[in-house]
Each structure stands twice: as structure tokens, then as C-alpha cells.
Amino acid sequence: MTVQKTERPPSGPTEVQTPDGGTRPEGPRRNPGRLAGLTPYLLLAPAIIATLLLLGWPLVNNGILSFQNLNMRQFILHLTEWNGFDNYKEILTGEDFWRVTGRSVAFTAANVVLIMILGTLVGLLLARLGRRMRTFLLIGLVLAWAMPVVAATTVYQWLFAQRFGVVNWVLAKIGFESMADHDWLATQYSTFFVVLLLIVWMSIPFVAINLYAATTTIPKELYEAASLDGAGAWKQFTQVTLPYLRPFLYATTFLEIIWVFKAFVQVFTLNEGGPDRLTEILPVYAYIEGMGNQHFGMGAAIALLTIVILLAITSFYLRIVLKQEEDEL
């Protein structure tokens, strides 16, 4: 009885014949699918790390600071006095925080409504204009959008100045002599009016350019079909334009809520939350309590509560948007 011997495969790398007749050792095969699956995570890793370092770490430190009683004395002597939730208890049981919160929400709502209405109208106007006029208007919008916030606020301070302001001079020239020396920053509502004009003026370009770019994605055949069906301009807008623009309107509104809610620079630079702290919104309130009054733990607690309120507002808005999209489907 004979046993047939089988040759064992070589343990080393095998040789593979190349097209030119030579041979090369065949190494272990790589799985391209696994590398392709890891590529998105590798590309996102630098941005995630930078976000954690630049945003996450300061947020953690701010949270730790909010549980301390820290003023200038403790800061100089390097003393750490933990007081638990006393800062939050004092803030949430006081009237000032809730008054400023309601003011901030109303201020944000008024600005966002005006920004979205006027920005949408300007965006639709861009779609209707000819090439030359559209280019001219786009240049003006980009210049207004690119202006630094402090520089724009300084310009508005000059425009609405009491003695040498352009606005008072124009009003006096057209017959409103009583407005010649009007102090626009003397009352709460007139100060908010100036801030509202400033923020709306700076925000319209972003909305208008976004929506104009969205209108370029609408097929022209849809307008032609609607025109053949006898649809007028309003019908074409509601049945053709608006459905295509709705996702862009949702996203832009979401971004504007965040941007307006944290409009610290405009309010503080214009009048530092005055007069009599009647125009303070939450970011300004946190800064004045923390840096101005040197209650650093209190300011940190207000800042964290501001983030929580902003997250609550945006999540409420997103729930409404998602529900409307589900109803449409």
C-alpha cells in the first residue's frame, strides 16, 4: 500500500509572474474596502481634534469655573472656593436673568423675522435682475457682509450720533427740526432700533446670496410648464419657487437664530447694554456680571445657561422643521 505524498505550500511569499516575463514575490493582499471605509474618519479626525481642543476644553474649564466662588481676591491669591450650585441657584431664583432671557428671545425673533423676509426679497430680486445689475448688487452685498463687526458698529454710532450724526441732520433738513439733537441711545427702544438696523443690514447679504444660489438650481422647464398652465407670478412662486427654496430657508433661519442670539459685539460696542442695562442680552449680561462686576464664577454660570437656552431654542425649531417635512412626505 502506497501513500501519495502531497507537497506543502511554501511558507514564504510566492512568486508571481509579471507581464514582462519576470517574477516578483507576492505579499499579503490588502483589503481596499477596509481602507475606503476608514478614509472619511481619517479626513474628519483633524477637524474633530481641533474642535475638541479649541471649543471643548474651554467649555469644560468654564463649567468647572461655574461651580466656584471666584472674584479678584481669589484670582490673585490662587484660592479655589467651591460653592456647588450656589451660582446657578442665585441666577435662576433672581428676576434679572429671566428678564434678560425674555428680552434676548424677543430681540432674536424680531431680527430673524426681518432678516429672513428682507433677505428673501433681495435674493429673489437677484434672480430677476440682468447680469450687469446683478453683479453690481452682489458686490455691494459682499462688501456689507465682509465689513468687520466693530467697524460696522462704529459707522452706525457716527450715523446716529446726537450732535453730528447724519441721520439727525437729514431728518432736520426734511422738516423734523425736533430731531436735530435727538439722542438715539438715550432710551431702551431707540437703542434696540439702532442695533436692529445694524444686525439686519449685516445679515441680509448672507440670506440673499444663499437664496439666489438656491434659485439657480430650479429647472426653468418648471416655470415654462406653470406658465403654460396659466399660473401667474404668485402661483409660480408658491408652487414652484417656494418648494425648492424651503430647505434653504430652514437651514438659513437656523443659522441666523444662532448668529443673532449671540450678537454680543454689536450690543456691547454700541452702548454697553445701556441705558441703565436695559438693552442687555444674555451674552452681554454674562460679560458684565463676570468681567465687569468681577464675579467670574457667576459669569461662567450665566454663559453655560445661555448655551443651554440656545440649544433648547434651536432644538425646538428643528423639531418643527422635521415635523413639517414628515407631514409633507
Image: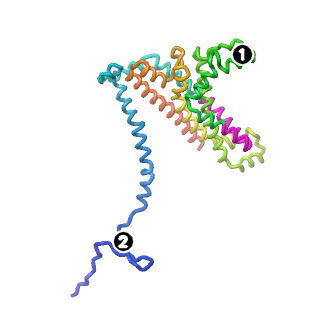
Q: Quadrant of the C terminus?
A: top right
Question: What residue sits right under mark 2 in the picture?
Answer: 26
Tell me the chief SS of the magenta region.
helix
The percent coordinates of residue 73 (x first, y second) are 33, 19
Q: Which image quarter: residue 188?
A: top right
For disc 1, the marked residue is: 172
Judge whether residue 244 is colored magenta. Answer: no
Q: Residue furthest left?
A: 1
Instruction: Give the magenta range.
Output: 112-139
Tell me which amino acid carries mark 2.
Glu
Residue, far front: 164
Measure how far apart labels 1 and 2 are at the Cα level: 89 Å
**Corner quadrant of residue 302:** top left
Q: Residues within 10 Å of mark 1 (few under 14, many from 20)?
A: some
Q: Residue at x 60, y 35 (%)?
A: 145
Residue 209 percent across, percent down from the top left: 63, 40
> As displayed, is residue 162 above or below residue 119?
above
